Image (spheres, rainbow, N blue to C red):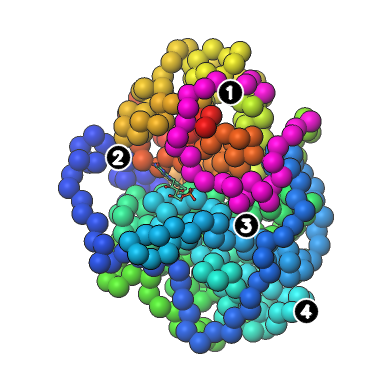
C-alpha cells in the first residue's frame, strides 16, 4: 500500500465482497471500555449547562468565542458531550451503554484524554476519561503543557485540551481492514460533539488534527500502533509554537487489553503511519466564520445531546423547505478544524421536501444546484447495501473526497471532516424533531458510477435524514 487512495480502494465493498462468508468471533467481543489498574479516580459532575439552541450553535461553529479557562463543571460537560453514556440497554444479560457520540456498529473504538491544569478540584495532570462511571483517571500528575505545546506545534493558552484516540481493534473485530475508515469517521463525530458543546456555551473551539504523532502518543502513553491519537480539541485558535524540552511521563499505569485474543491488521497500522507527521512544517488553515445567521428555533443543545440516537424509523412524510435549508446550512457549511476545511464535497439526494423537486443536488458557490432530477430513493437504498430505511429518507447526504492528493494526513482530515459534519447533521436533525443515521456500509464503486464521480473522487460516508 503506497497511499490512502490505494487503501480506500482496497477496502471498498462490492457485490461479491459483502457476500464472502465472515464470522464474528463473539468469544473475543471487544470491551467498549479501557480500564487502567491502580489509578486515582476523580468523579466528574453530571452534565449541567445552560446551552444555546442547537441550530444557532451549529450556524456559529466557526465564529469567535471566548478563550477562557474551563472550570470543573465545564470540563465535566465537555467530557460527557464527547463520550458520555446516554442510554443503557440489556445486551445478552449485561448492561450496554450507548454514548453521546454515534459509532459504527456501536463498537466505540475511541478513547478520550485530557490535559488539565489550574482546576482547584483536580491535580494538574494527564487524565483518561472513563465513560463507565463518568470519572477522570489520573495517568500522570504534573503540568505537561509545555510538552503538549511541542507535540501540538501550537501554543496552549487555556487550561484544558482534549485528545481523541482510537483503539482500532474494537472496530476491526467486525469491519476488518475497512475499520480504519470507521475509526476516522467515529473520531470526527466525537470532535463534532466537543466543538458543538464549547460553542453552545459561548467558548471558542478548534479541532486540531495536525500534530507530531509520536510525541503526542508518547505524552498520553499509547503506542501509536494499536491505539493512536487522531484529533485534539482546544477552546482557542492554535498559534504556531516551536519549543524545546519535551518531557513526557516516565511511566504510565497499566491498562487491560480490550480484546482477549489480539486483533491485528498490519494494513491499518501501515496506512495510519503513512500519515504521521514528525515536524511542525505544516500550514494550519482554519475557516473563517460565515456571516449569515438566520433566526432559528430548535431544541437547546444540551437537550439535543441527550436525545440524539441513530433513527431508522422514517415515515416518508414531507419536510418543509425551511427544515431542509436549516439542516444543510447549519451542518455542512463550516467546521472549525485545522485540516483545511472543506476537504470533502457533498451531494444531497432529496425526496419529499416541500417546494423542491426530487433529485440530486449539490451546492456550488453557495447556491443549491440540481445535478439529476427524479426520485432516486430506491437506488440509494440499494447502494447502501440494501438498507431499506434509506429509501424513506427525505435527504441522503453523500460525502465524497477527491484523491488528487493521495496524502494520508489529508485523507485523515477528510474522513474526520465527513464524520464531524455528519455529527452536525445528527444534531441539527434531532433538534428539529427529525431523525438521522450514519451509513458506513455502501458499494463504493457503484456509488461512484451512479453519481458519475470523475477521476479520483470517491464516496466517503452517507448520512440519511428523515421525518420520524
Ligand atoms: C461511521 C458510522 C457508520 C454507521 N453505519 C451504519 C450503517 O451502515 N447502518 C446503520 O443502520 N447504522 C449505522 N450507524 C449507526 C450506528 O449503528 C449507531 O451509531 C450505533 O449503533 C450507536 O447507536 P446510537 O447512534 O443510537 O447511539 C453508523 C454510525 C457511524 C458513526
Question: Quarter-wise, where is residue 115 in the image?
Answer: bottom right
Decide which of tag 4 and tag 1 comes sooner along the chain.
4
Crowd tier of the residue under label 1, counting other residues whose Cα lies within 10 Å: few below 14, some 14–19, many 20 or above: some
* Residue sitting nearer the eye, 419 or 299: 299
Residue annotated with mark 4: 120
Residue that appears at 53% across and 29% down: 467
C-alpha gap between disc 2 and disc 4: 51 Å
**Mark 4 CB lies closer than 8 A to ligand 1:** no
Element carrying mark 1:
loop
Residue annotated with mark 1: 319
Decide which of tag 4 and tag 3 comes sooner along the chain.
3
C-alpha gap between disc 4 and disc 1: 49 Å
Decide which of tag 2 and tag 3 comes sooner along the chain.
2
Residue annotated with mark 3: 81
- Give coordinates of residue 376: x percent, y percent: 41, 19
Residue that appears at 46% across and 76% down: 35
Amino acid at each position: 500500500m503506497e497511499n490512502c487512495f490505494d487503501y480506500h480502494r482496497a477496502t471498498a465493498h462490492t457485490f461479491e465482497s459483502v457476500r464472502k462468508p465472515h464470522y464474528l468471533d463473539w468469544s473475543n467481543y471487544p470491551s467498549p471500555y479501557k480500564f487502567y489498574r491502580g489509578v486515582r479516580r476523580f468523579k466528574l459532575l453530571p452534565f449541567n449547562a445552560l446551552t444555546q439552541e442547537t441550530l444557532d450553535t451549529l450556524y456559529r461553529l466557526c465564529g469567535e468565542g471566548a478563550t477562557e479557562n474551563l472550570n470543573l463543571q465545564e470540563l465535566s460537560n465537555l467530557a460527557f458531550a464527547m463520550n458520555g453514556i446516554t442510554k443503557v440497554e440489556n445486551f445478552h444479560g449485561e448492561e450496554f451503554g450507548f454514548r453521546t457520540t454515534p459509532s459504527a456498529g456501536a463498537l466505540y473504538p475511541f478513547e478520550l484524554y485530557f490535559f488539565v491544569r489550574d482546576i482547584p478540584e483536580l491535580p494538574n495532570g494527564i487524565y483518561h476519561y472513563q465513560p463507565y462511571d463518568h470519572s477522570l483517571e489520573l495517568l500522570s500528575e504534573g503540568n505537561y503543557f509545555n510538552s503538549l505545546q511541542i507535540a501540538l506545534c501550537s501554543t496552549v493558552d487555556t487550561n484544558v485540551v482534549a485528545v481523541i484516540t482510537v483503539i482500532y481493534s474494537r472496530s476491526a473485530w467486525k469491519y476488518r481492514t475497512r475499520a480504519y475508515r470507521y475509526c476516522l469517521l467515529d473520531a470526527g463525530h466525537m470532535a463534532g460533539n466537543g466543538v458543538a458543546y464549547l460553542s453552545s456555551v459561548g467558548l471558542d473551539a478548534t479541532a486540531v488534527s495536525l500534530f507530531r504523532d509520536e510525541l503526542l502518543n508518547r505524552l498520553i502513553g499509547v503506542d501509536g500502533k494499536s491505539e493512536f491519537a487522531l484529533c485534539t480539541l482546544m477552546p482557542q485558535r492554535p498559534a504556531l509554537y516551536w519549543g524545546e524540552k519535551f518531557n513526557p511521563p516516565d511511566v504510565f499505569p497499566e491498562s487491560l487489553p480490550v480484546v482477549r485474543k489480539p486483533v491485528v491488521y498490519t494494513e491499518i497500522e501501515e496506512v495510519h503511519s503513512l500519515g504521521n507527521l514528525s515536524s511542525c512544517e505544516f500550514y494550519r488553515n482554519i475557516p473563517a466564520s460565515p456571516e449569515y445567521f438566520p433566526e432559528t428555533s430548535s431544541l437547546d443543545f444540551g437537550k439535543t445531546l441527550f436525545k440524539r440516537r441513530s433513527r431508522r424509523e422514517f415515515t416518508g412524510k414531507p419536510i418543509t423547505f425551511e427544515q431542509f435549508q436549516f439542516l444543510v446550512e447549519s451542518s455542512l457549511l463550516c467546521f472549525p478544524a485545522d485540516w483545511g476545511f472543506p476537504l470533502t464535497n457533498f451531494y444531497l439526494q432529496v425526496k419529499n421536501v416541500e417546494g423542491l423537486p426530487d433529485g440530486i443536488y449539490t451546492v456550488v458557490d453557495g447556491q443549491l444546484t440540481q445535478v439529476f432530477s427524479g426520485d432516486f430513493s430506491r437506488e440509494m437504498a440499494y447502494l447502501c447495501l440494501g438498507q431499506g430505511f434509506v429509501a424513506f429518507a427525505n435527504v441522503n447526504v453523500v460525502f465524497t473526497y477527491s484523491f488528487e492528493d493521495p496524502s494520508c494526513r489529508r485523507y485523515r482530515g477528510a474522513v474526520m471532516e465527513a464524520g464531524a459534519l455528519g455529527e452536525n447533521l445528527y444534531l441539527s436533525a434531532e433538534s428539529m424533531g427529525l431523525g438521522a443515521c450514519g451509513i458506513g456500509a455502501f458499494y463504493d464503486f457503484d456509488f461512484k458510477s451512479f453519481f458519475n464521480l470523475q477521476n479520483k473522487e470517491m464516496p466517503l460516508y452517507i448520512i440519511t435524514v428523515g421525518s420520524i
